[in-house]
Amino acid sequence: MTYTQRKRKALPSLLALFLAVSLLGPLASARAGVGELGYPLPDIGTDQIRGDGRIDDIRMEEREVVIGDRLYRFLTDTEYYTSTMGAGSIHLLLPGTSVGYITNPQGEILKIWLLE
């Protein structure tokens, strides 16, 4: 087989690869877990819930927070972020603070961040 024949035979495979990458590229960004404003999204294929609201009360010793009259619990591996998605701390969360969060169905906060 000549070089030109091999090149012609490889062309459909290259076009298929380019098409697959072009079509699946947007899905990869959603899987990365970041939304249009830079805030986290629930993991794809899970029952995680995304919400936002104002902190009504926070009980650090009990690792609990009340947001919009609902009680949530912090896990030992809850991720805390600032409004610019930098590393945060539970100590930044105060009553009256607006936050976004991702929970599991048991009401445990997986990720929480400050809203501007």
Image (tube, grey):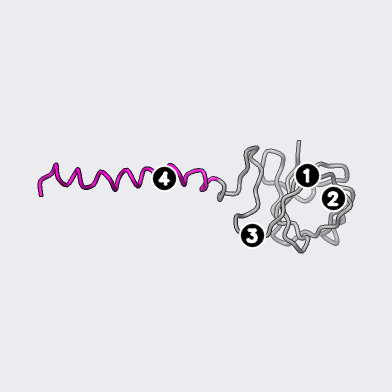
Callout 3–callout 2 Cβ contact below 8 Å: no
Residue that numbered label 3 is attached to: 46
Q: Amino acid at mark 2?
A: Ile
Residue 64 in the image: state x and y as whole percent.
84, 58
Question: Within 10 angstroms of label 2, few (less than 14), some, or many (20 or more) residues?
Answer: many
Residue 5 in the image: state x and y as whole percent.
14, 45
Residue that numbered label 1 is attached to: 99
Residue 69 in the image: state x and y as whole percent.
89, 52
What secondary structure is found at the residue carrying circle 3?
Answer: loop
What secondary structure is found at the residue carrying circle 1?
Answer: strand
Q: Amino acid at mark 4?
A: Val
Point out the stretch of residues depicted in magenta.
1-29
How far is the residue under mark 3 from the one under mark 2?
Answer: 22 Å
Q: Amino acid at mark 3?
A: Thr
Q: Residue at x 85, y 47 (%)?
A: 55
The mark that comes first in sequence, 4 or 1, is 4
Callout 4–callout 1 Cβ contact below 8 Å: no
Q: Nearer the viewer, residue 7 or 65?
A: 7
Callout 1–callout 2 Cβ contact below 8 Å: yes
Q: Residue at x 66, y 43 (%)?
A: 39
Which circle, 4 or 2, is nearer the viewer? 4
Which circle, 4 or 1, is nearer the viewer? 4
Callout 4–callout 2 Cβ contact below 8 Å: no
Residue that numbered label 4 is attached to: 21
The mark that comes first in sequence, 3 or 2, is 3
Q: Residue at x 86, y 55 (%)?
A: 70
What secondary structure is found at the residue carrying circle 2?
Answer: strand
Residue 27 lies in magenta, yes or no?
yes
